[in-house]
């Protein structure tokens, strides 16, 4: 059907690229572009021999002119941004300059401030409308599938949704004393930031890891989970009518939290530059360099993830509760695409979002979050491409 330019070559990109090649009827040709071309070439070598044509390129995604030149040379139908969130705006600028659709999995973050907001990308709405192209934001799992789950629940099961609890459980074990399952810099910035949830028309701020709950996750078991702020809360508050409260919880083991607290106490999680041997370095970036690469965790990780949304609301005047979730097996993911489940659960929805934009099913001029489109084709694709969803009408609720 068409061509996709995929920017980035980390764990999530690896999964999305494998899935694009599996879906060769839609992705006839892809170009993998990254700052480090050798990584792109190594992935291309793994995938050659299939129906999808794979090429590679070197690009600095912080440089709009380089991105524009690459897009003009390759002429893709869509740019799938799987680079760092810091690079969202430069890639969006390049898409505007070339008239090409844009898809990403995570909202923009300024490098010097751990602040997760959509305002920078939502500010592009009018320019994308005038250009006649689509920007699809947050087509990962959370954000991403959680937004699609919400749109699906509202379309098929509720007249109004009043309460949403998003529960993200990773029951996997990689055997390391401390490691992060995705980019360490992004992960640690996220979990050391203050928590926030939305209730009765206002945002309530909490200290990091202040609110803890326990939950019994199917296929994983009883886990401690902690309230965090997550970017899909911001868009769902805007797009779900009648919402009274929305929260996000993520599970963490005690070993992870103890190591993280020690690192925080000695300043290793700081994003403020310090002087070291005559050079300016950022402690968190140095920590990222010495931690295990998330892409190396695949062959070591055993166990499952369970991520989903619990909805409470009304249908035909009666109260209703509904739980949509996915269970994913780390070892099965590794057998299929050489990745652990955290990258898999983000990479598959990234491919699906790009596919729906290319097919015209999720295509209208402007900047949109996933819940603003018809959820049905996305939900169908989840079942087809490796993330089958399950549902319950009597779930355990979170107090």
Image (cartoon, rainbow, N blue to C red):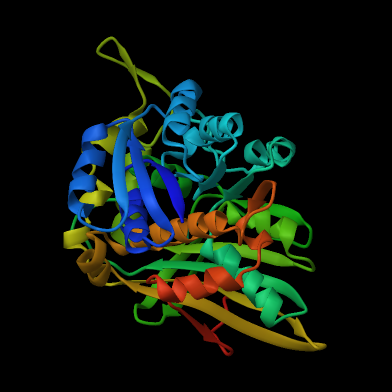
Q: Does residue 8 appear in the picture of this structure?
A: yes
Which of the 4 image quarters holds residue 287?
A: top left
Q: Is residue 75 left or right of residue 235?
A: left
Instruction: Report the quarter where the C terminus lies.
Output: bottom right
Depth check, front residue: 295 or 52: 52
Hey, which quadrant is residue 216 in on the image?
Answer: bottom left
- Measuring from the top left, give residue 153's x and y in whole percent: 65, 76
Q: Residue furthest right?
A: 317
Residue 171 position in % (x across, y down): 32, 70
- Out of 225 and 309, give the one closest to the viewer: 309
Task: Judge left or right: residue 152 versus residue 331.
Answer: right
Left or right? Give the position of 229 relative to 161. Answer: left
Visible residue check, residue 399: no
Rendered view: 186 above or below 216: above
Q: Is residue 90 above or below residue 48?
A: above
| x and y, in percent, of residue 72 in the image | 48, 30
Front residue of 236 and 344:
344
Above-or-below relation of 81 to 171: above
Foreground residue among 324 and 61: 61
């Amino acid at each position: 059907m068409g061509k996709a330019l995929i920017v980035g070559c980390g764990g999530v990109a690896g999964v999305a690229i494998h899935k694009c090649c599996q879906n060769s009827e839609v992705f006839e040709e892809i170009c993998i572009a990254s700052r480090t071309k050798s990584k792109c070439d190594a992935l291309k070598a793994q995938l050659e021999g299939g129906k999808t044509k794979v090429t590679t390129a070197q690009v600095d995604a912080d440089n709009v002119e380089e991105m524009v030149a690459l897009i003009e040379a390759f002429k893709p139908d869509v740019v799938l941004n799987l680079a760092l969130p810091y690079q969202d705006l430069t890639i969006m600028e390049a898409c505007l300059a070339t008239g090409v659709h844009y898809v990403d999995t995570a909202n923009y973050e300024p490098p010097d401030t751990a602040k997760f907001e959509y305002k920078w990308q939502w500010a592009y709405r009018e320019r994308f409308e005038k250009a006649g192209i689509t920007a699809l934001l947050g087509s990962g799992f959370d954000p991403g599938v959680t937004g699609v789950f919400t749109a699906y629940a509202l379309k098929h099961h509720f007249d109004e949704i009043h309460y949403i609890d998003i529960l993200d459980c990773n029951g996997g074990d990689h055997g390391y004393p401390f490691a992060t399952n995705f980019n360490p810099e992004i992960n640690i910035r996220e979990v050391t930031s203050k928590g926030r949830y939305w209730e009765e028309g206002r945002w309530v701020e909490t200290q990091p890891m202040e609110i803890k709950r326990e939950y019994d996750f199917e296929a994983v078991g009883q886990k401690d989970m902690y309230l965090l702020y997550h970017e899909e809360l911001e868009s769902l508050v805007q797009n779900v009518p009648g919402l009274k409260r929305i929260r996000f919880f993520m599970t963490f083991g005690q070993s992870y939290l103890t190591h993280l607290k020690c690192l925080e106490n000695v300043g290793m999680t700081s994003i403020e530059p310090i002087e070291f041997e005559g050079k300016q370095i950022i402690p968190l970036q140095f920590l990222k360099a010495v931690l295990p690469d998330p892409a190396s965790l695949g062959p070591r990780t055993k166990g499952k993830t369970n991520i989903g949304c619990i909805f409470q609301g009304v249908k035909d005047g009666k109260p209703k509760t509904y739980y949509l979730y996915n269970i994913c097996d780390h070892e099965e993911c590794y057998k299929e695409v050489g990745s652990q489940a955290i990258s898999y659960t983000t990479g598959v929805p990234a491919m699906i979002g790009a596919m729906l934009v290319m097919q015209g099913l999720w295509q209208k001029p402007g900047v949109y979050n996933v819940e603003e489109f018809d959820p049905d084709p996305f939900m169908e694709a989840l079942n087809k491409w490796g993330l089958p969803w399950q549902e319950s009408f009597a779930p355990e609720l979170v107090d």
